Amino acid sequence: MPGPPGPPDSDAAATPHRSRPAVRLTPVRPPDETGAEVIEHLFEHWKRIVARRQSSTARNSGASPRDVAGRQTGKPGTEGRTMRRRAAGITAAAVAIAVAAVALPLFQPWRLLTDTVVDEALPGTAPISMTSSSTTPPTVSAHAAKPTPVVKPRPKVLLTGKLITHEHRTSGTVAVLALPDGSRVLRIENLDTSDGPDLKVWLSDAEVVAGRAGWHIFDDGAYRSLGSLKGNHGNQNYPIPAEVKLGDFRSMVIWCDRFNVSFGAATLA
């Protein structure tokens, strides 16, 4: 029969017994979201982080934005250049609108394509009326008497001239007429010039000079306005005030008062 067990070995006695710590199981509260919802939530959070980094990088270095996977979606600085070009385009459009709002009413460029025709009769030459207000029928004579011609005084020509071209092609004739009633009128016949803004008819003491040298001289000395130009084509009359001394003036001009330039002028002699 085997004897009782002997004493333990020295190594075994020197090595203490190591037992595993007890595992304490605690109940875990089930999550509010399912696994798929948690994954989707984390994925959306990750995308927001990537988007913030992308925006920060584009602002600081002008680098091209990247997609969710980190791939570059364009050339570096493209987005910044596009925004600058768009801003420059908007600024240019705003400036163009502002300039047009000021320039169009001032220059009125459409008037270069418009015409106004005025055809006035020569003063004092209106036809004599042949109608009668009498209700008595006329008597018939075997020997009808010849009607006595009525001689109507005609205007007297004091000065004449021929229009020449200055800034715009201009032609026609002018005359200063003394009417039977003692008044005077400047008459322009067969006028042909351009329409324009603020055109006036002036008497001037300036000498008419052909070419560009004569465009701007008529407001340097004495002048008298006879009113606005009635039309850029036709025959027109402009009364001359009684106090105007014709000897003080030697020319007439179609003057653009907006831009201080002559469209055309004529020497009066």
Image (cartoon, rainbow, N blue to C red):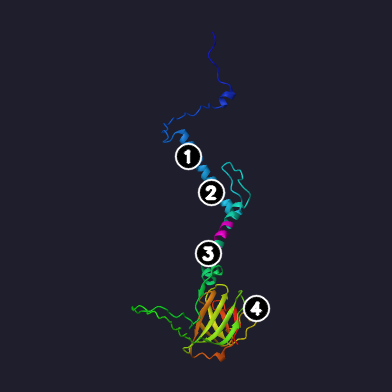
Location of mark 3 (residue): 97
First in sequence: mark 1 vs mark 2: 1
Q: Which residues are magenta?
A: 85-91
| Residue depth check, mark 2 versus mark 4: number of the one nearer the observer | 4
Location of mark 4 (residue): 212
Q: Alpha carbon of mark 4 to alpha carbon of mark 3: how far? A: 33 Å
Disc 2 is placed on an element classified as helix
Q: Alpha carbon of mark 1 to alpha carbon of mark 4: how far? A: 81 Å
The amino acid pointed to by label 2 is Arg
Q: Residues within 10 Å of mark 3 (few under 14, many from 20)?
A: few
The residue under the point 59% across, 57% down is: 85
Examine the image and state in which quarter residue 144 appears. bottom left
First in sequence: mark 2 vs mark 4: 2
Q: Is residue 121 magenta?
A: no
- Tell me the quadrant of the picture where the C terminus can be found: bottom right
Image x and y of residue 188, in percent: 55, 80
Examine the image and state in which quarter residue 213 appears. bottom right
Q: What is the number of the mark on residue 197?
A: none
Q: What is the number of the mark on residue 52?
A: 2
User: Do callouts 2 and 4 mark residues in contact (Cβ within 8 Å)?
Assistant: no
Disc 1 is placed on an element classified as helix
First in sequence: mark 1 vs mark 3: 1
The amino acid pointed to by label 3 is Ile
Q: Alpha carbon of mark 1 to alpha carbon of mark 3: how far? A: 50 Å
